[in-house]
Amino acid sequence: MQILLAATVVVPLLGALAALLPAPPGLKGRNPDQAVLRHGVTVTGAVLALSVALAAGFDHDHPARMQATTDISWIPALGIRIHLGVDGVSLPLLVLTALLTFLSALYSYFKMPSGPSPKAFVALILVLEAGTLASFAVLDLMLFFLAFEMVLIPMYFLIARWGGEGRERAAWRFILYTLLGSVVMLLGLLLIGIKGGTFDMVALATDNGSGLSHTTQVIAVLAIGIGLAVKAPMWPFHSWLPDAHTAAPTVGSVLLAGVLLKMGTYGFVRIVLPIAPGGAHTFAPYLAAFAVVGILYGSLACLALARRGAKGDLKRLIAYSSVGHMGFVLLGIATLTPTGVNGALFANIAHGLITGLLFFLVGAIKDRHGTSDLDALSGATGAALYGRAPRLGGLLAFGAVASLGLPGLAGFWGEMLAMLGSFHPADGLSRPAYLTYMALAGFGTLLTAAYMLVVVRRVCMGGDGDGRPGGAPALTDVQTYEFAAWTPLVALTVLAGLWPAALLGLTDPAVQQLLRGGN
C-alpha cells in the first residue's frame, strides 16, 4: 500500500520527463505526435490503475485511519518530512483525479487542441496530475503548499498556449489571483507550524488547536482561508474563473473544474477544521454568508447569460454554475457538522463528475458547430441537438438535470446534506442565521433548475425552443472515443446518486474523527 500511494504520486512526474524525450524506435506510431499522445494515455492509465488498486486494498472497515503511510525526514533543519497517507476523505479525490486525467488524455489522443508541440502538452498534463494527487496525499503543511503551487504553472501554460480567444489575459488573471492567494496562505501555514511546533498535519489535528492560542488560530484561518477561497473559488475571489474556463481548451476546463477547484475545499476540511477549530468557529458564519452569496450570484449570472440576445457563452455559463455549486460545498463546510461536511465532500465528487461531463459536451458542441455562443447555438440554424445529434442532445440534457440536483443522480445528495447541516449547525453558531442561509441556498437550487432548463431548451431544440431548426444538416453525433471518455462519468453520476452510501461510508468516519481533533 505504501508503494502504491508513492507510485501514484511519482509515476506522473516520471511520465512527464519521459514525454519530453524522443520516442524509442518501434513506439513512434504513424508520427512522433501520435507517439507522445499515446504515452500520455498509457501513463495516466497506469496511474488510474494504481489508484484503483489503492482503493481496492484500502481497509474500508477503518476509513478514519491514515493508511498507506510513508513518513521519512526530508529537511531536518526545518522539521519538514515526506509524509504521505490516505483516509476516507482523500481517497475518493485521488481516484477522481486519476480518472479525469486519464479521460482527458484519452480524449486528447483523438482530439488534440490546436497549439504547440503535443510533447509539452502531455508533459504539462502529467505534471498537473502529479501536483493534484500530491495535494490530496501529503500530510505535511509545507509539502501541501508545494503541491498546491505545483499545479499553477502547468495550468497557466495549458490556457495560454492551447486556449482560445482571450487566452493570454485569462492565463495571467489565473496565475496572479492564485499566486497572491497562495502567498497569504503560506504565511498562515508558517504561523501554525511555528506556533504548533510541527508541520505534521496529523499531529496538529490530534492536538486540535490546543497548542495554538485563539488569536493565532483566527489569524491563521484568515490567512489560509483566503488562499483556499481563491482556489475554491469563493465569491468574491471567483472572478478569474469564468475567463479561465472560457479560454481554456476542453480538457483544461475539465481538469480545472473537476480537480483543481477541489484542492481549495479539501484544504478547509483537512487543515482548517481539525487544526484551528477555534478560528474556524469564528469565521464559519462569514464563510456561510459568502457561500450563499456565491450560490445566488452564480445562478443569477447564468440566468443572465442564458437569456435570448445576451450573447452568452455556454462555457462561461458552465463556469459561473461552478461558482454556485462550490458555494454549496463551502456552506456545508461552514456548518461545522458531520452532516454538512459530508455533504460538502459528496458535492465535491459530484461536481467533478457532472461538470467534467458538461465541459466535455460543450467542447464537442463547439467543435461541431464552430461556436459556443448561446444565441448562435439556439438560432434558426443553431445546434438543434435533438434533431441533428440526438445522442449528444440526450447527454447534454442528462448533464443539465444532474447539475440541477435531480434526486437519483449524484448532484442531489451533496446539496441536500449541505442544507440539512445548515438546519442544525454546530453548537455556538446562530441557528436563525443558518436557517436563513439554508432558505437562500434552497432558492438557489430553483434558479439552477431555471437556467439549466433554459439552456437545454435553447440548445437541444433549436430555433430558440420553437422546434424549427431551419432544415440545417445533421451534425456528427457522439463518436466512439467520445463514448469511451464520457461513459464512466455518466455511469458514476448514476451510481453515486442511487448508492450514496458507497461514498458516505468512506467519508463519514473520517469526518467524525477530523471534527473531534483526530481522536
Image (cartoon, rainbow, N blue to C red):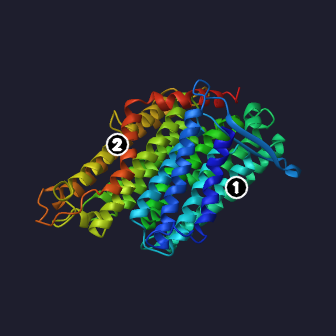
Near-viewer residue (313 or 31): 31
Residue 146 is tagged as: 1
Q: Is residue 175 left or right of 435 when viewed as pictured?
A: right
Q: Mark 1: which amino acid?
A: Leu
Q: Where is residue 326 in the image (x, y as percent from the top left)?
A: 48, 46
Residue 88 is tagged as: none
Element class at badge 1: helix
Q: Where is residue 145 in the image (x, y as percent from the top left)?
A: 69, 53
Q: Position of residue 187 (x, y in %)?
A: 74, 53
Residue 369 sits above or below residue 517 on the image: below
- Tell me the CA gap for discs 2 and 1: 35 Å
Q: Which residue lies furthest to the right in this view?
A: 77
Q: Which residue lies furthest to the top in this view?
A: 61
Q: Which residue lies furthest to the front in this view?
A: 26
Give the quadrant of the N terminus: top right
Q: Is residue 261 visible?
A: no
Residue 478 sits above or below residue 407 on the image: below
Which residue is painted at 42% across and 67% down in the image? Answer: 112
Q: Residues within 10 Å of mark 2 (few under 14, many from 20)?
A: many
Near-viewer residue (18 or 298): 18
Element class at badge 2: helix
Q: Is residue 38 left or right of 74 when viewed as pictured?
A: left
Give the quadrant of the C terminus: top right
Which residue is painted at 64% across and 35% down in the image? Answer: 281
Q: Where is residue 410 in the image (x, y as percent from the top left)?
A: 40, 38
Residue at the disc numbered 2:
402
Quarter of the view holding residue 508 = top right
Near-viewer residue (254 or 177): 254
Residue 30 sits above or below residue 456 on the image: below
Q: Mark 2: which amino acid?
A: Ala
Q: Is residue 147 visible?
A: yes
Q: Which of marks 2 and 1 is nearer the N terminus?
A: 1
